[in-house]
Amino acid sequence: MKDTTLISVIIPAYNVALYLPQCLQNLKYQTYKNLEIIVVDDGSTDDTAKIAEQHGVKLISQANQGVSVARNTGIKNATGAYLHFLDPDDLISLNFYEEMIATALKYEAEAVFCGMVNERQPNLSYTNQQEFLAVIKEDKLALTNVGSQGYCFKYLFKTSFIVSGNLEFEKDVHIAEDMIFSLESVCRANKVVAVPKAIYYYKNRVTSALTQLHKKDRSERKKMMAPLRDFKQRFEAKHSVKVICDPGVIIRYRFLGMPIFKKRILDSGTTKWYMFGICFIQSKVLQ
């Protein structure tokens, strides 16, 4: 297809000098070439800004304010007809934008999304088997599974839809902030379309916010997740829908390097034990 539609790629970057070169190389060799690459350097103290300059991309430097503000800065400076949020430590297939924009234009959709490969937790990898279009609120939420897989990076959004709707990331939410953005965006979009391919590779580094959350005790997790729960309640009341949103904690037990047991502790207090992927014990802590 002809690369006639400009896509703005927004990369929030904080001390990612180790990963940014690979990220930008990934973009250089995309089969779809009409990309506006925006690196928002969020007060890095390493060579993040220098690497962005060396690759000739649009660089915006700001004081450290967090990933939500960095993404919002990217939105304000995006000139493309569509936009995508790319985490600098992740990977995308070299035909990612070709697949996504073709589907978006075919259906004139405000949002299209793809499946993803979760490198650290393969059991959370997923993709849709068919190309689906949803316009009913409940179907959009179910199709995207946005309540538990609210990652903003799996979506390509129409820029005018995001800007005119004043959709932005909550700067005071530091855990699963993209889930809030994705929920609002998916719910408001007139058309949401599934690209039936897993073309985003989520690395889920050990330093990520969610990974660090999983290492904390239950009381601290509940405190950190409070803003997300508050939003969920407001969202459900506003849109008259029920959203399942309980990321919880996953602990794996290995024997000779092979994963045998998995323990999943949900924020609701439910604990599930799995053997070779099959749940065989489920219990709930009564308050």
Image (cartoon, rainbow, N blue to C red):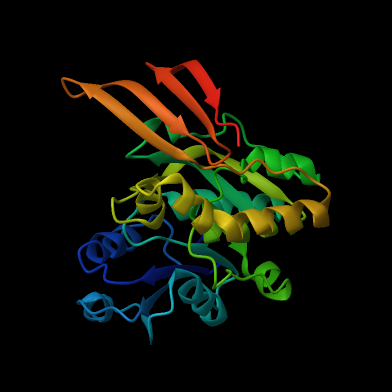
Q: Position of residue 108 (x, y in %)?
A: 71, 56
In the image, is 166 to the left or to the right of 71?
A: right
Compared to 160, does 26 lie above or below? above
- Circle count: 0
Inspect this view and state whether residue 133 appears: yes
Quarter holding the C terminus is top right
Inspect this view and state whether residue 152 appears: no
Q: Where is residue 168 in the image (x, y as percent from the top left)?
A: 61, 71
* Residue extending farthest front: 287
Residue 39's image quarter? Answer: bottom left
In the image, is 124 to the left or to the right of 49?
A: right
Q: Give whichever of 218, 197 is nearer the camera.
A: 218
Q: Position of residue 96 (x, y in %)?
A: 44, 50
Compared to 85, does 51 lie above or below? below
User: Which residue is located at x 40 percent, y 70 percent?
Assistant: 12
Residue 245's image quarter? Answer: top right
Q: Where is residue 164 in the image (x, y as percent from the top left)?
A: 72, 74
User: Which residue is located at x 81 percent, y 54 percent?
Assistant: 237
Q: Give whichever of 177, 151 is nearer the camera.
A: 177
Compared to 139, does 236 lie above or below? below
* Residue extending farthest left: 256
User: Which residue is located at x 77 percent, y 55 percent?
Assistant: 190
User: Which residue is located at x 73 percent, y 53 percent?
Assistant: 233
Q: Give whichever of 244, 157 is nearer the camera.
A: 244
In the image, is 118 to the left or to the right of 219?
A: left
In the image, is 158 to the left or to the right of 204?
A: right
